[in-house]
Image (cartoon, grey):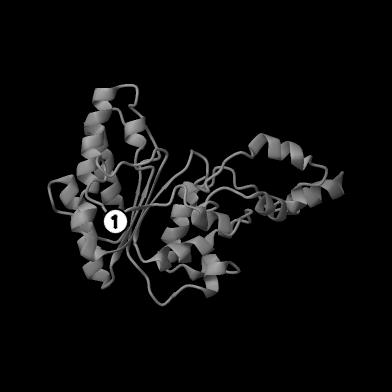
Amino acid sequence: MRDWYNAFMSKKKLPVGIQSFEKIRTDNFYYVDKTPFVKKLVDEGGGYFFLSRPRRFGKSLFLDTLRQAFLGKRELFHGLFLENNWDWSKKYPVVYISFGSGVIRSPDELKLKMETILEKNAHFYQEKLSKPLISDRFEEIILRLSEKHNQKAVVLIDEYDKPILDNIHKPELAAEIREELKNFYSVLKDADPYLKFCFLTGVTKFSKVSIFSGLNNLEDITISPDYATICGYTQEEFENTFADRLEGIDLEEVRRWYNGYSWLGC
């Protein structure tokens, strides 16, 4: 019994619900290397990307991986693809926005949430925002960080649509919240000269004629074959990464439980 217990405790930990790349890389969690996609996205040259995936598919973790790469945290990428395939001499200011936590019940609550998020970003960079309107404050922090660090800024937005989905059963309220978000995200168009890269995630696919009407260069990679495995695990990744936990496991049964998702655009 003791030998079994010691063997079990020596294994890496399962990253259930972990959205922090830093925590996974510093606290002995299993990790499937998705960092080749970080370089691929940046090398694409477009700069504005959108990804839709179901909940619990790893969107937030990938977004945080992007964040740590742009912040220049090379030590977190030791042994991964990006360690030797990224220009670590350059560090970029990152504005990180997530609507994943909590439930938004009104436009006023959404405004308070936006204000809190922007203040958190400003505090991280020891900045103080002065503009009265939330959309202006969003633009203000992008411009300030770009000028302060003499680098274009990176904007990462996680669960862009959650405030709408929180109220999907109330169409009129959902429409009001959509308009608030549309006004907020419209800042990205005018801030383009100061932006290096933007990545947005959500559950629902965006419509360019509604919430992102100003971002004509926003590339939807949701069903692009080139990015089909950007989140989640392939069968090969699953079997290789978790091999030490799969002894005696019926892999065909596991395949039956979880396989079936396809993001190849066909």
Whether residue 71 is visible here, answered yes or no, is no
151 to the left or right of 227 = left
Q: Residue at x 51, y 53 (%)?
A: 225
Q: Could you say which quadrant of the image residue 219 lies in?
A: bottom left
Q: Residue at x 55, y 52 (%)?
A: 229
Whether residue 54 is visible here, answered yes or no, is yes
Image quadrant where one finds the N terminus: top right
Q: Residue at x 47, y 72 (%)?
A: 86
Q: Amino acid at mark 1?
A: Asn
Q: Could you say which quadrant of the image residue 173 lies in?
A: top left
Disc 1 designates what residue?
Answer: 217
The percent position of residue 90, horizontal first and vertical second, equals: 38, 74
Camera-side residue: 7 or 146? Answer: 146
Extreme residue toward the bottom, this view:
89
Extreme residue toward the left, this view:
132
Q: Could you say which quadrant of the image residue 164 lies in?
A: top left
Q: Is the residue 193 above or below the residue 214 in the image?
A: below
The percent position of residue 220, horizontal first and vertical second, equals: 38, 50
Q: Is the residue 144 above or below the residue 6 in the image?
A: below
